Amino acid sequence: MDVTFFGVRGSTPVSGKDYVEFGGSTTSLDIITPQCQIIFDTGSGFRNIKIRDDLPVFIIYSHFHHDHIQGLAFNPSLFASRQDIYVCSALTDKADLRDKLQGYFSGSYFPVDAISALSHLEFIDFAMLNALLPAGHMMASIPLYHPGGASGYRLTAGDRTLCFFQDHEYEPASQVALHEFASYADLVVWDGMFTDAELQSKKGWGHSSVEQGIQFAAETVCKRLAIAHHAPTRTDTDIRTLQAKYENEIVFFAREDMALSI
Ligand SMILES: [Zn+2]
Ligand SMILES: [Zn+2]
């Protein structure tokens, strides 16, 4: 499983000299296995993902806040693709998912009806996904705690497992199911938008902390945990400071264009 972080910023894209190292694009994660391409969320980082024409392609949404969908209509290789691309979310059914994306990319919000133009997007119910994934691949979902809802995912491909938890407000005492869901994963992508200190005034905003990610990694015995969804105010210097304090052989701070094989 080859994993590339195309966007690791939360809430809004950012740019400028303070964001060169970790990047300013919002959430989009590209996963390539020998049999398929799976993309989690289409934040502004999605613009730079190369849609494969030689593999089945699946786009999976955690939820529909703008930082997780805004890049969909800006990817040239998506428009150029000649094959069906499957699109789904465990948070809603295929008709509602299409309506939400079409509403965002049309009318008062967008100059053309992008979803109608992308007629090769094949919207499917999440319940259909596993029947369409190649043999040896399996996707499971779990509800996350986030205003308006969000879905977490566990992708298994062969003997490797990746968990994608964006966006999520973690409550250690009440989220036993999430521990079981993520146990022994090869990689967990964690919503580390805040620090514990910042979290005190951000209860109910739907995000977790860096420190909670470290605790979660230890408790679930995952092999690697990526801190992502960096706050838009978090500069390269800020993240380097957090890195020096918290990074270890398991936990790391994701940066845009970072690629790893698990
Ligand atoms: Zn977000
Ligand atoms: Zn959100």
Image: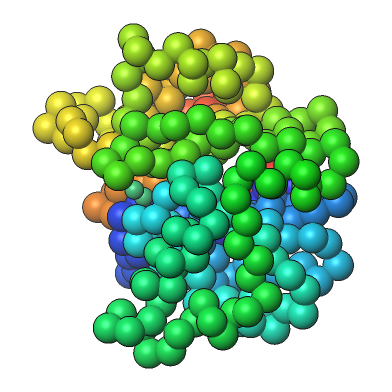
Relative placement, left or right, of 81 versus 153 is right
Q: Quadrant of the N terminus?
A: top right
Q: Is residue 60 visible?
A: no
Q: Quadrant of residue 239?
A: top left
Q: Is residue 89 visible?
A: yes
* Quadrant including the C terminus: top right
- Which residue is rendered at x = 37% and y = 72% of the image? 103
Outermost bottom residue? 111
Q: Position of residue 257 (x, y in %)?
A: 59, 58
The foreground one among 252 and 208 is: 208
Residue occupying image coordinates x 79% and y 39%: 137
Q: Quadrant of residue 156?
A: top right
Residue 226 placement (x, y as % from top left): 52, 36
Q: Identify the residue at image location x=54%, y=82%.
A: 116
Residue positioned 40% across, 64% down in the render: 100
Task: Describe residue 241's horizontal placement relative to residue 188 as left or right.
Answer: left
Tag count: 0
Identify which residue, 95 or 66, lies in the foreground: 95
Tell me: residue 182, above or below residue 73. Answer: above
The x, y position of residue 224, in whole percent, is 61, 28
Q: Please state the horizontal and vertical placement of residue 136, each as a whole percent of the image.
A: 85, 36
Residue 24 lies in what quarter of the image? bottom left
With respect to residue 1, does 246 lie above or below? above
Q: Is residue 77 left or right of residue 254?
A: right
